[in-house]
Amino acid sequence: MIKLASRMARLGTETAFEVLAKAKALEAQGRHMVHLEIGEPDFDTPKNICFAAIKALTNGETHYNPSPGIPPLREAIAADISKRRGIDVKMNEVVVTPGAKPIMFFVILALAEEGDEVIYPNPGFPIYESVINWVGAKAVPIPLKEEIEFRFDIEDMKKLVNDKTKLIIINSPQNPTGGVLTKSDLEIIAELAIKHDCYVLSDEVYCNIIYEGEHHSIASLPGMKERTILLDGFSKTYAMTGWRAGYGVMPVQLADQVSRLQTNSNSCVNTFVQYGCIEAIQGPQDDVLKMVAEFKRRRDVIVDGLNAIPGFKCLRPHGAFYVFPNIQDLPIGSRELEQYLLEEAGVAALSGTSFGEYGNGYVRFSYANSVKNIQLALDRVKEAVAKL
């Protein structure tokens, strides 16, 4: 038996991929499954982006490139963030990584030491807590509450932030709830971060998938650019999940260290992929607008459908492509319901506990699937829970 390093016991996982594997195994046995577990747009990458990457391939852009990314892409990101967030971003503040997860990993690894505290949203993306624990820092959950549309309670936040806090992680629009933080929420976080001299990792990968209101970035607030790590990427907005391209915008001193971590692990992101990313930013955004409009249509179908099923109470999320219904009136727990729907109904969903302790009593459905399949899933869920 291999004796693993003790730190491996502290490393978590992303349950969506585990449920996906179970669903695929059932499909291999001849079962029909509706996949509402994985957070992946079901659209193809827009053609103009594909053609830009193909052109780069045929032009020989297949070699190593600088660890923080090719200069044309970093310049494009800097210009785009400067325009959309209203802040002055330079190329040397941008690091391009294979997907957005490495920014989480590298930033937490670079900033948090044993004894430091890192505040993160719960329920929230499970990799936050996983990496905090792995580096030996203290993971401090901030509960997101259904009664305030899955935002945090300001008084809770004030109690949690202290002089041991090294990093506050926020995510808006949010996975798994679809909740969106208000500008006033961000102002409170900014005030606390400045008072206690800590940093903020702002996960904004769903910032372009928002249905009501507008997206606000904490990096845009006074005094926050120099203490914010803005995380974004191409997977969700441009249906580029398999391309593996994300980025972080952060102070130069930290960007240099994150680049070193990239050199020590991934070396760099595929060169031709980065040319596709340039086209994603600078090319027409028509396909993005169409995708968001379709996501909104699907959101309304699944929310209305779930609320018509006894035992489900579902808020209408303002962003991302997930719903997080309350199932506390059902005679079954979150984890049990996940397994029951998979085996009994042929519907793959995720237990709310996959996103932390405060997700108990909820399940997550991704509506990154067709209206036809969503309706089929709703019919199956209604029939299955009626048997409980």
Image: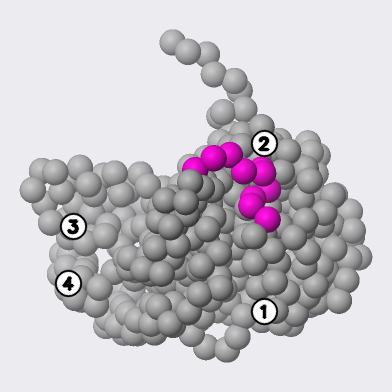
Q: Which tag is nearer the camera, tag 1 or tag 4? A: 1
Quick one: label 1 or label 3, which is nearer the N terminus? 3
Q: Position of residue 51 (x, y in %)?
A: 39, 63
Quick one: label 2 or label 3, which is nearer the N terminus? 3
Amino acid carrying label 3: it is Met
Quick one: label 2 or label 4, which is nearer the N terminus? 2
Stretch in magenta: 62-71
Amino acid carrying label 2: it is Thr
Q: Position of residue 64 (x, y in %)?
A: 58, 39
Q: Which mark is residue 333?
A: none
Q: CB atoms at circles 2 and 4 under 8 Å apart?
A: no
Mark 4 lies on a secondary structure that is helix
- Report, in whole angstroms, how far the alpha carbon at label 2 lies from the one at label 3: 41 Å
Would you name the residue on which mark 3 appears? 33
- Report, in whole angstroms, how far the alpha carbon at label 2 lies from the one at label 1: 29 Å
Q: Which mark is residue 84?
A: 1
Q: Using the image as rendered, state which of residue 96 and residue 292 is in the foreground.
A: 96
- Report, in whole angstroms, how far the alpha carbon at label 2 lies from the one at label 4: 46 Å
Q: CB atoms at circles 1 and 3 under 8 Å apart?
A: no
Residue in the picture at 78% in, 75% down: 87
Mark 2 lies on a secondary structure that is helix
Magenta span includes 65: yes
Magenta span includes 313: no
> 194 left or right of 330?
right
